[in-house]
Each structure stands twice: as structure tokens, then as C-alpha cells.
Image: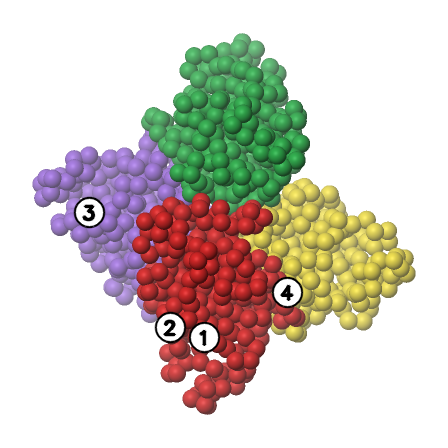
Chain colours: A yellow, B purple, C green, D red
Amino acid sequence: MCRWLAYSGTPLLLDTILYKPAHSLIDQSLHSKLGVETTNGDGFGVGWYPQEGVGTPALLRDVGPAWNNRNLREIADHVRSPLFFAHIRASTGSPVQQTNCHPFRHGRWMWMHNGAITDFHLIRRELALLVDPELYSDIEGTTDSEVMFYLAITFGLDQDPPGAVARMVGAVERIGHDHGVEFPLQMTIAVTDGERVWSFRYSSQGTSRSLFYSTRVDTLRELHPDLAFLREVSDDSRLIVSEPLGDLPGAWNEVPESSYGVVQAGADEMYPFVPEPA
Amino acid sequence: MCRWLAYSGTPLLLDTILYKPAHSLIDQSLHSKLGVETTNGDGFGVGWYPQEGVGTPALLRDVGPAWNNRNLREIADHVRSPLFFAHIRASTGSPVQQTNCHPFRHGRWMWMHNGAITDFHLIRRELALLVDPELYSDIEGTTDSEVMFYLAITFGLDQDPPGAVARMVGAVERIGHDHGVEFPLQMTIAVTDGERVWSFRYSSQGTSRSLFYSTRVDTLRELHPDLAFLREVSDDSRLIVSEPLGDLPGAWNEVPESSYGVVQAGADEMYPFVPEPA
Amino acid sequence: MCRWLAYSGTPLLLDTILYKPAHSLIDQSLHSKLGVETTNGDGFGVGWYPQEGVGTPALLRDVGPAWNNRNLREIADHVRSPLFFAHIRASTGSPVQQTNCHPFRHGRWMWMHNGAITDFHLIRRELALLVDPELYSDIEGTTDSEVMFYLAITFGLDQDPPGAVARMVGAVERIGHDHGVEFPLQMTIAVTDGERVWSFRYSSQGTSRSLFYSTRVDTLRELHPDLAFLREVSDDSRLIVSEPLGDLPGAWNEVPESSYGVVQAGADEMYPFVPEPA
Amino acid sequence: MCRWLAYSGTPLLLDTILYKPAHSLIDQSLHSKLGVETTNGDGFGVGWYPQEGVGTPALLRDVGPAWNNRNLREIADHVRSPLFFAHIRASTGSPVQQTNCHPFRHGRWMWMHNGAITDFHLIRRELALLVDPELYSDIEGTTDSEVMFYLAITFGLDQDPPGAVARMVGAVERIGHDHGVEFPLQMTIAVTDGERVWSFRYSSQGTSRSLFYSTRVDTLRELHPDLAFLREVSDDSRLIVSEPLGDLPGAWNEVPESSYGVVQAGADEMYPFVPEPA
């Protein structure tokens, strides 16, 4: 399994979120508290949209652990971004290679995943056949996560992200059930087009991996008027994380089972998530 | 494109073949003379059968250039083998990752390739669908070469290597032609089960990459009675190489276009190679 | 800090020791029980003497974690050796690079270390100046461990390993104390010339990292007559390990504080270890 | 040997300089025309000052070839900078590791080098002893280039870059001559504090590696009024390169033997370079 975080809001040095917090993602790479594995050392990735405006995000991905990677440290110390994803990987079997590191990118879209398709090797072929044939050759790695991304693109991610993810999940569950898999899918997912961030928490069994979102900054500021950091970020700055980055009272809220949220200009939203047939 | 060599015969330190010759494979990684690219620095691999008897071969593969890899140098200096493959890669587009490095292995079989399937991205999906569904999930990388290997396995490599390769080529050419590709395939291939080595030279256009085999050692010994090295290896020791490792007169013979050879106990053999429908 | 093991005895597939045991070194790379750090993912190394007789040992070292390294898995599955070292690293600050991975080699000698020189950056220069000037340029990495090795060579490792190590420790403590460091050194060390293995447990404070040696095989065989594995290895096969590889009753004995042992043909020996002025 | 480039001027996407030109640095990594080696595949580095103002530069360095590195491609496509260095390495013997990749950084300073200290292993120790003892432990790699950087810092780089480099060269030549080396040094060097760039061309024998600087943009614009690119960059934008990035008439000027130049706000300058005793 893995750990990830998504940030959207006031442009920040990546370091502020990736390294500074007490239980930062880098700390989680060595000592995850809520993950299935305590160590997430099988590669990492960070993807960010440059400050100058939306376009394709930049990716830095590598196969070693995040905790000792110098290039990640450099990027974190020198790059500011209003929207970035970061992911640390604990492989569930597929090779440790750059093309298996999250986030994945397609045009202006980024995608990352924690969880697994149960018995993926049994249904990898059938899932790959569902991917739009025009896109098949764009699949570069061998993870379930990337196939899920390409299925979501096939099912209309560009027009309707929640619907596309619902149909992706529907397809995975149908094919898994066809092969006698009782609980085919386990996932938390983040996906963005550079403007909005959608995050999903779902599992076939109803026991999904942990997922949290940060409290609105204006509310946090009232709770903690002494925290200088909160005065530097806008009210709608938001973090979505596999596990809380610290223990600030009131800062973290669990995403309910079978839900998805949208972080966007204006009010953020949360909805129930229900797979759709596909 | 790439460069490769296959050795079968008296157990030798890998160093004897990989580094010692004037125009060794390591030298070719920097300065190939006959290759499409002069530099072959996009990963390498060596696969060897241990001396103690046939079993699965060991693989050492990595993503950097062969010329500066210390682990390869260590293995070459300390491991003896009666049958080994070595390959240096110049990527034609697919990612530089361990799972894209040759040789590929399946059970006791090893496979390596120089060349390319033309417009592979156009037909990758159709070719993958021809692979035995039981084997689909074993494909770990994204090269044309590995798909060709799995097609050959699907088409009976275990029972009839030349026939399986002929059917693989037939399938690639048929599907390529279906997509309007005039010359779908370019290849030199080596494949072994640990006892025999089959090597193939073929291209749809009839202008195949170079391939050479060494003269029988007893003949070479008569030509060069002063060469100590020749007294240490058995008469039937044999090298098959993308390009000659030196310029010893009489040592190297070109494999004819559209041919394949078998290196085996007893007399080696050479035959014409003709693709078969599949 | 780090974890290591040294094996001497009946030639074994490296896999038998590196991967097979319940709490193998590979398991310790993710979940060390007795180490300062639970994760040892900052590079690894294995060094082995080929079966064919003593010479220089072969090294396989790499910068990623041991637990997901495919080349290590391949070597372990295919190489037999009568004497090998393995080491997993948790960096205490120096870069994660191949030249900082243990074991280190000089001629036929191998050396590996767990522990640290306190405030090494303060005394690195003075220690380096003590190294035989002829050897200074052979230092390839930046660890305290490698400088300790070169000091031991300077102080006569080739003639008198325990004396050379005692003088190395004496020098480190003297220079550390000169710089106001109360407890300059913490170490467990293994060193071999390919025939004998010396192992040391010592720290300036008298609270050394853990070190264990396996019980003689003939004694173990009496304790556990049902264990097939014990019938396949000679009486004098011996393991020295940072932490036990399992919980077989009677199998593991702690090396006492300030001691060193010698594993050799004939009876193994254990002595007190006392630093010497140098 | 190596190849490098330094850019100062209108903030540009790194891609504009690193990949776009016909004979870009990336192309030189495979096919250098003027270098000692045609292939420069033993690691690379890029260092850039963020647009938001001078501070420490960011470094991206890795051990594989530049031509197939995806993270470099990502940074080049997404990062703009008014001052950046890029370097591709062909090792002359020291290990291929991140800490041996240029540029090197110390505070706000960056340094890169093409060339070599002759018989460096003979005088490495003496040179290292000349480095300010406070700085000795900051040396992370094992190249001559990094020792030259630390000598220049020791000799006053912060106050007087040309003088510090002249004294560094004087020291290297003196110690080399003491060891019977006829021509101790070969170098082109670029060094910057984030505001000015100094570049040096010198060798003890008077046969220095090639070095070129670009013609002032206003002059180039008159020569080539049709080139859109030239309208987008300021008059004082400047490139210094190991070899020209293309064959635009009038664009490239060779730096004379034994010279150094300063790229700065206002008029750039060129002076003779003479080693000083140290």
C-alpha cells in the first residue's frame, strides 16, 4: 500500500507540506502510523502545477525511498506551487520502477492511488482490454493504479470525473466478481485537472484505507489564533492526506466511507460515492 | 537498437568474453561500429546458467550504461558459466527500466533481441491479445522484444523453438500489414533453454541487423597455433555476436539473411528462416 | 545504524541465509527488532568468495533497499559460497551511494561495520591524515566505516587483525577525546581475509550494538535432531549476526561487551578486546 | 572529460537551452563533436536559481545519462530561470555517483568543471590538506573538480573569484610539479554567486579544452532579424558553452587560451588568466 497527499491553495514551497510537519509524508515513508505497511520505500513521486498558470504538471519520480532522495529535497526547497500531489509507495508486488510510481499524468490530469485491486494478475488482461484501444499503448507501467487511471479516462474523466471513477469501480468489481473475487477493490484516489481536486474513499468490503481532509483555514485560524502559518495561507487552502500530518486539535477530518469530495474555487463539497455499472 | 552476444562452451569467467576482447561488448556500449546507434547506454543485462548444471539462469540487469557498472564488472570477474547471454540496450522509445532490459527469462528459457517492431505502439494491443491469457500478467515491461518472447512461448517455444519463432514473426507481419506497415519487423534474436542456443536473423525488408558466429575452435586453432586462449576452450565452444569482438582473421562468419542456427552438443546447424502464418 | 551477517562453513546458496530464515537480514531491512532504526533501507551489499578457492571476493552493492532489489534476489538464488558477508545500511548522514555501501574490500580483505564515530565530521580530516598516504586515494566513499577500515590496514591488518583493530580504535578514541567527544566510538565489525573471520563488539561507552554468534552445528544437531537443515552443514559452519535470524532455542549466543572472536579452521576462539594507543 | 553550459539573462524554460538547439547539451551527451570523448553518459546535473530572486540554487543531479533521464526532461519543461548551469559527465575514473556530479554548490555558489588534474590520485591527499580544515568534511565526493572548488573557496572565492581561482591553479601546479607531473592541470570552469558568472579557460600545457561564449543578443539580432527567438531575450542574455549549440553564423566566439570572462549587469568583460602562487 501507499501514502499520499494533495495540496491546493496559496502557492507554497513544497517543503512546507512535504518535510516541515511533525508527521510529514517523508516521515511517513519511514514510520507510517495508519498504513498497512509502516515503511513506504518502494519509490515516490511528486507532481506540481507551476505557479505561472495551469498547464501540464511537472513530475519528479524515482525508485528509491523518499526519505533519502536529494533531488526531492531540492525541489521541495526551491519550487512553489498552488496545487501539488505527493505519493510514497509500498509495492504490493509490481516492479519498483519509475513508470510504476505515482502520480500518473495524462495531458493536464494527474492521478494517484492507495490500495489495490485484489488478485490483479487474474484480471489485468480483461481490464486492459476495456481501456480505449487508442490509449492502450500509453500505459507505461504495470500497476493496477495506472490501469484504473486509464479506465477512468476511457469512461469520461475529462467530462465527469466522479462518474468516470464510479464506472471504473463498477467495471473492476464486475470483472473481479466474474473471477470469484469477493472484494475486488480497495482505494483512496486523488485526481486533478489543475483546477479542481477530486478525492475518493471506497472499498468493496466497506473497510477503506484512511483518508483525511484539513479543516477550512478560517475556522482553524479562530481555533489557533497564535499559529503564524495559518495567517499566510488563504481561507480555502486545503490538504487531503492518507494520514494526518500532525495532531493539531480540530485540524483533521476523516472522509467518510464510500464518499468523494471536490476541492475547488468557491465552496468545497462532499458526496456519497456509488459505483456504476460499466 | 542494441548489441548482444551469446556464449556456449567451456565454462569461462564472464570477463573473458565481456571485457577482455579488443572490441568487447562493453566497448560496443560506447563505440558500436555496426549498430544503428554508436552508443548503447540505456541499460544492460547478463544472464548465465551456473556451472553446477542446468536450471534457471541468473540475471543481472540494470538501467545505467554497462561501461560504468560496477556490479557487472564484479560478476564478470568472479562468475564462471558454460552458457551466458549479454545485452546492451539503445532504447527506441520505451522507458529505461530494469523490466525492459534483456535478456528476458521464463522458467529455464532466456531471450534477447536486437531490432524493432515498426510502429509498435499501433499494434502493441493486438499483439498482447494474441499472448496466451494465462501468460499476459507475466509481461513485466513495455518492450516489443518481451511481447515477441511471450508470443513465441504462446506459439510453442518449449516444443519447437524455430517453429514458434516463425509463427511469432508471421503474426507480427500479418498484424503489421493489417495496419498498413510495409516492413513490420527487424530482428536478430537469441534464445536458449540452457542446453541449446537458437539464433535468428530476419527482417521483413530483407536488410537485417548484423549477426556473426565464431568459427569452430579446432579450425581456429589450426589457423592460429600460437594463441594460448584457443588451447583452453573446447572445440565446440561458440560465440554468436551482433558484431565481431576483434579482427582475428578467419574467426568470424556472417549469419546469412533469413537464417537461423542451432548451437548444441554434436554438430551445430544452420537453416533458412521462413515466417509461418499464425 | 545498520545490520549485518557473516557466514563461514559449508558452501551454501546465499538465499539459505539471506532470505529463508524467519527474521532474515532482508526482513530486518524492513523490520529490525534490535537496531537503532527499524528500517535499514539506505543501500546494501553482499560480498562472497567464490567456491573455487580463495581470491578476491565479489561484491554486489546498490543504493536502494535490499528488500526490493532484484539483482540481490538473483545472486542469492544462484550463487553458492563458503564465506560471505551481507550488510544493510541505515545512513547516519553520509550520502546514499554505492561507495558508501558495505562491505568494503581491499585486495582479499572485506570489512563491514555497524555503529558510528561520534561527531565524525569534526575529526574526519585528522583520521584521514593518519591513513597511510599511499592508501589515501583509495578511499572512495565518505563513511566513518571506510576510514576505520583504512586505518586498520595502516595499522597492520594484514599481519595482526586484532591488534590493527585495537590500534584503530585507540586512534579514534584519542582524537575524539582531543576534540572533547566523551564517547567517540560505537562498533560491531566483521573482517575477513577469505579464510578466517574476525568479529568485534566494542563501544567507548560500554553499551555496544547487539552481536550474536550461532552455536556449533554439532551441538545444535543434538538439541534439534529433527532439523534437516542441520544435517546438511558441517560442524564448524558459523553465523555472526547483528540480531538472531529466528528463535530456535539454543541457537544464538550474545558476543560479550568488549570482545572479539575468530572463526577459523579448528576451534573458534573468543577474547577480550582492549583498544591500544596509536 | 565533460561538457557544460552556463546561461544568464531573460528567464527561460530550461528546455529552450537544454533540449531545443540542434546540437544541444543533451545531443552532446550522445554525440559530442569537440570533446575528448564522444559520449558523456556518466551522470549529469543542472543547477538553477529560482526566478523569485537570488538565494541558493536548486540542483538536480543523477547518475545515469542525461539523454534518457525523465526527471531532467520534466524540470526542463516546467522550470524557468534567469541563471542556470548544466553539466554532462564523462568520468575519468572516479565513481559514477551523485556526489561526483556537477554542478557543486556551497551556500549560494555553484561550480562546474571540464578537464582533469593529471595524476590526481598522486596528489589528492596534499590538495585535500590545503583545504580549510573547517571545510574538509563538507567534501562529499571524490572528484578533482570538487577539491578544486573547495580550494578556491579556501583561497577567497567569496571576495575575489578570479584571484581565488588563480591561487587554486597555482597550488595545483606547484604540488603537481613537486610530484614530477609536467602539466598538472586542464580546465574550463564556470562559477557563479547567482548574480555574476565567471568562466575560465586554462591548462598547464596551453592546449585547453574548448570554450565558447555567445555574441551579444543585440548584435545577433541585427545579423538575423528574422529569428523570433532573439526578440524574446534581453540584449545581455549570454551563453557560455563547451561547444556551440548550433551553427548560426556570428553566434559563437571562442574564449582565448588562458583567459577568463565575467558575465554581469552592465558590460561583460574578458581578461587574461594567470595562475598565482599559493
| For residue C16, above or below residue B92 | above
Q: CA distance from mark 3 to mark 4?
A: 61 Å
The residue where tag 3 is placed is B214
Residue at 58% of width from left, 68% of height from top?
A: D194
Residue marked by disc 2: D256
Q: Nearer the viewer, residue B179 or C157?
A: C157
Residue beneath disc 1 = D270
> Amino acid type of disc 3?
Ser
The mark that comes first in sequence, 4 or 2, is: 4
Residue at disc 3, secondary structure? strand
SS for callout 4: loop
At label 1, the amino acid type is Met
Q: Are tags 2 and 3 found on a single chain?
A: no
Q: Position of residue D189 (x, y in %)?
A: 45, 64
- Within the image, what quadrant is residue C255 found in? top right
Q: Quadrant of the C terminus of chain A?
A: bottom right
Judged from this view, the residue extending furthest toward the front is D277
Q: Which residue is mark 4?
A: D55
Q: Is D217 displayed left or right of B224 in the figure?
A: right
Please tell me which residue is depicted at 49% across the width and 83% down the height of the picture.
Answer: D217
The secondary structure type at the circle numbered 1 is: strand
